[in-house]
Image (cartoon, grey):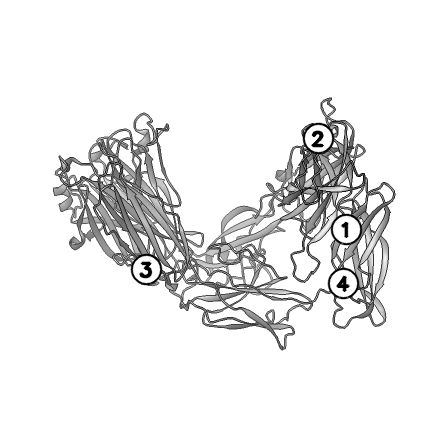
Amino acid sequence: MSYRAHATHARAGEITAKRLGNSLSYDITFTGYFDVSSNGIDAANAQRDVPMYFYPARGNGQVEAKRVDRINALTRNIGNNTTQNIYTIRYTFPSAGDWSISVSIDRRNVSILNLGPPPTNNLNFYVHSNISINAFVGFNQTPVLLNAPVDIGAVGQRYIHNPGAFDADGDSIAYHLYTPQQDVPGTGAGQNLGYKDPNLVTLPGKTELGVSPAAFSMNAITGDLIWDAPVTKGLYNVAFVVEEWRDGVLIGEIIRDMQIIIVDAKNDRPKLDLIPDICVEAGTLINQIVKATDKNGDKLTLTSTSGLYQATALIKPAYATFAVPQQGAQGTLTGQFTWQTSCNQIRLEPYEVLFKVEDGPVAGAPNANLFQKLVDITTLHITVFGPQPQNLAAAAVTDAAGKAFKLTWDSYKCQVPGAKIVIYRREGCLAIPVVKCFTGLDGYGYEEIARVNADQVSYTDNNKGAGLKSGVSYSYRIVVEFPRPDSDITQPGYLIGGGQSVASEQVCIEVPLLMPVITNVTVDSTSAARGVITVKWTRPTLSAGASIPAQYKLFRATGLAGTNFTNIATINTNLVAGEPDTIFVDKNLNTVDNAYRYKLEYYYTDAGALVKLDETDPASSVRLSQGSANPNAIRVNWTANVPWSNDSQTHRVYREDKSKPGTFNRIADVNVTGAASYTYTDDGTDKYAQDGTVNVTIAKDVVYCYKVETVGSYNNTQIKVDPLYNFSQIICVSASDTTKPCVPVLSIDLLDCATLTPDEFCDQTSFTNNLSWTYPNTANCDQAITAYRLYYTRYEGDTPTLLKEITAPATTSFAHEGLTSFAGCYYVTAVNKYGTESAPSNTVCKDNCPIFAMPNVITPNGDGKNDLFTPLKCPSFVQSLEFKVFNRWGAKVYDTKDVNINWNGKNNGGSDLAAGQYYYEVTVYFESVQRGGKPATFKGWVQLLR
């Protein structure tokens, strides 16, 4: 049977598919767009059927075509001399796997300017789509392209097309351009045509706004196909792919091949106001005004397409409406989009609503039949999220496992079948900022501990039978996860793409602080021999079973990051409130040259003997130094190495009043965000008037003295001392002290991955990076160097923090020991006697050498040999991985995130898989200087023997 119809003048088309339940059967539809001008209408009418091919993806397409009839009742003229024809067949694929479906039609239009070889009416029209059939995908229908490709563009004006892709399943959609094709004769496969992007057919022109050159592109996220702006009138064909993704897996592709008709028009295109994206809680009524204008005062027609409307019915009710009361108005036209959202419409991906305005001749216009209608398009994206669960509470309960809490909450507002309430827990209570439209709990350190059906209102946490820790504060929150729209909730993966609720407020179960924490390390006096620092800490609560007397031991080390601690005080205590036993005044220090760092050990009495409970995190004094500035200003920088946060606070800067020696006047408040903002440049102006205004003129070689007061917090409601105030030492400097040191040159001992053996780092748990640097001997920078500061960051791109201050010039090298991997970045600075720090040196980064290999056989027979599929040798620096196993039909049968994999030949349900060859894909995230790990994907096969 022949499927050729002479000169069909096919303009555009695509193939879509809808899976019937969890079977191998699909309804397949080819939507074709045909030229019905006087040259093509006869051929278009004669296209009563099309040949459709079904063949394995990446196959040669050598299969017999199936005849697919046109559904005449659905044929309609959609304007611009174009008819839309629908051809549908129900087809059952012979097996699961990846399949291609294609349609070819003879012939294309004549004189298409960007296709070849000419004449283009000898080239046939061809499109194909790809679908993936496996248990993981489950029920699926491809996106539907709701906006017909029939709009006309004008020379010199921006052309826009959007396919209006709507995925009823809530899958993620992406777009990219594709080369138009024709069929390989006698097969269902395609081959590329000679093709140029439309903007490259003639000499580059300009955009609508007059910028050169003209551009042609497709937005990968929104699907906007924009040509800004055409230069030459005529016919052009382009093609693009609409990709469908689910849980990071590509499950389908639709190719739309479409024609762009460019004309010379004495008409300016209408324009739509851009509409910001909308994010709403389910149950919100959306009322959105859409406004269109036309500078020529032409008649306007405003329309909308989306799966949200009853005409397409791709969602569960309630449906959206779009009303245009003054349709056909001249110059300005508004419409109102209305949608009452509901719980059934919660999903991860936004819904898309396309609006299109088309102009036309006004009534009585001369030669109205010659008017060239132009359009503009904009798309509204609407995200619907789940309501926040309410009134989460917790109470201690008696449980055989030990410590346990019963969580309760209000009955959830959205009772969607298959929805799950996910219970999260973390150690320590944490306030989370309210961020509009932020759902879930990613990034806040919570761990999922359980899931219950959405109709449940309680859960008892006993740490899965192990009991919760004593002496630990716990924070709980719950989040609701929803099924993907239209998914089969009996099938695996039905929650993927279904969206989430906003996290509940936390319920915080606080236990008394059993350990003290240091709250103050403040410099009271600056002196080379008689400096004074006051150290304070909190009084702990006596733990169950412990008794008094208790004891504090205070230790001190020299330097911001000092580790050589010496016991300087032992204080016995009965933990009586109000007693002066949580303070120590440390005297006879050199606070001019040194910062000091303190830690505290805490002991309680048990069976008549002192027992150490723990020690605090160390806290240093605030260190002030001079930075570089203009000759008529002085810059001061400060830092502290403390367990609390000094960020997002207002620090205070003081300058000595020369008319009152020893009296410091507060001259500025500095709003700090992070360590890099701990700086202030004094131009002599007193910017803090509350304690009196003392302005000075910063003069060269005049000495000015400064100190700063930091403000910090533990951000912990149990620590009542808040905020925390601490003074730095005093520095006295002049503007002439700002000649900066030279910039050192840094190097590091890099690894040669090519020379490493697979077992190079077996059983090694500690690693060392060796750094060295040189200091330039040039006259234009300070040669009087007193120290080097080495900075380190674990991840490339993060702001490095001070690792070590090293006395100069004796040492120009450093071994960074005790690392868990080699990954890290460094730079070094030089510091002169005035505390002025050079610019950072070159940054050097060292990365790990990823080592990972897999076997190709597994014999899970219990003999202790090859029973588990695990990486060979000892894989190094593996941070995390995602491992998947597929059968020979491409269906996923097993997955895990276990870094040791430990696959035992079973599927995720615990059933033994049949012997045979399987294929695996493992994406390994290696510990790296890249945050999140450096991913590498390994693919291969494994023989399962039984």
Q: Residue at x 34, y 31 (%)?
A: 207
Disc number lying in front (4 or 3): 4
Q: Residue at x 67, y 62 (%)?
A: 718
Inter-mark Cα distance, 4 to 2? 47 Å
Mark 1 or mark 4, which has the lower sequence index?
A: 1
Type of amino acid at the residue the image marks with label 3: Ile
Tell me whether the residue at label 3 lies in contact with that at label 2, contact meaning CB atoms closer than 8 angstroms.
Answer: no
- Residue 77, percent across and down? 17, 47
- Residue 802, percent across and down? 70, 42
Tell me whether the residue at label 4 lies in contact with that at label 3, contact meaning CB atoms closer than 8 angstroms.
Answer: no
Front one among 331 and 464:
331
Instruction: Give the label on residue 315, or none.
Output: 3
Inter-mark Cα distance, 1 to 4? 16 Å
Element class at badge 4: loop
Type of amino acid at the residue the image marks with label 2: Thr
Tell me whether the residue at label 3 lies in contact with that at label 1, contact meaning CB atoms closer than 8 angstroms.
Answer: no
Type of amino acid at the residue the image marks with label 1: Val
Residue named by callout 4: 539
Element class at badge 3: loop
Residue named by callout 2: 697
Q: Quadrant of residue 554?
A: bottom right
On the picture, is 899 further left or further right than 578? Answer: left
